[in-house]
Amino acid sequence: MKDQYRELVNQACAVRMNSHSPYSKFRVGAAVLATDGRVFLGTNVENASFGLSNCAERTAIFTAVTAGAREFEAIAVCADGLEPTAPCGACRQVLVEFGLDMVVLIAGQDGADGAIRQTTVRQLVPDAFVTFVDQSQEGS
Ligand code: THU
């Protein structure tokens, strides 16, 4: 695996420590690598109204998009526990929005020192929903 990907995994593990997860006590960090080389980070942010909680992957992607990044090479996800935890369905659909070929690195809390699964959004979401309203129809 590329050193850059191992570093991305370790960045995800490091930012996981900023997780706000007093309800689940399950910390997750994510680091997304934009094609321009920038890295954006995210953690899960929970709420007393549980349904308002946001996953680490979406926090990272939304932070990137807010900063003007739209094209991504890879995302690393690092959660508590030694076994890699795969992204939830909601986050997978958000990743689909930004590219089926995005590499997804899934790691446990030991980061690059532990087991890392390398996959792609395409593999995580077979037969993905990608259709969008034809924007030329807007306003008609
Ligand atoms: N969580 C993530 O941050 N990413 C995922 O892909 C799965 C779940 C968070 C949401 C919640 O704060 C906690 O993990 C327990 O579900």
Image (spheres, rainbow, N blue to C red):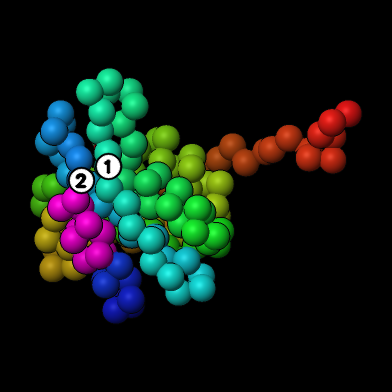
Q: Decide which of 9, 129 is in the foreground and name it.
A: 9
Q: Which residue shows up at 15% across the image and 53% down it?
A: 17
- How crowded pointer 1 is (Cα within 10 Å; few <14, some 14-19, many 20+) is rated as many
The magenta region covers 9-18
Task: Reply yes or no: does residue 16 show up in magenta.
Answer: yes
The answer to whether 24 appears left or right of 105 in the picture is left
Main SS of the magenta part reads helix
- How crowded pointer 2 is (Cα within 10 Å; few <14, some 14-19, many 20+) is rated as some
The answer to whether 117 appears left or right of 128 in the picture is left
Q: Which residue shows up at 33% across the image and 76% down it?
A: 4
Marker disc for residue 90: none
Marker disc for residue 19: 2
Q: Is residue 86 visible?
A: no
| Quadrant the N terminus occupies | bottom left
Q: Which residue shows up at 49% across the image and 59% down it?
A: 67
Query: Is the CB of the residue bearing disc 2 within 8 angstroms of ligand 1?
Result: yes
Residue with the most extreme bottom position: 3
Q: Amino acid at mark 2?
A: Ser
Q: Decide which of 117, 135 is in the foreground and name it.
A: 135
Snapshot quadrant of residue 108: bottom left
* N-term mark: 2 or 1: 2
Q: Decide which of 101, 20 is in the foreground and name it.
A: 20
The answer to whether 28 appears left or right of 34 in the picture is left
Task: Reply yes or no: does residue 43 show up in magenta.
Answer: no
**Relative height, residue 89 to residue 1 (above, below):** above
Q: Is residue 5 visible?
A: yes
Query: Is the CB of the residue bearing disc 1 within 8 angstroms of ligand 1?
Result: yes
Q: Are marks 2 and 1 in contact (CB under 8 Å)?
A: yes
Whole-angstrom CA distance, mark 2 to mark 1, is 5 Å
Q: Which residue is mark 1?
A: 44
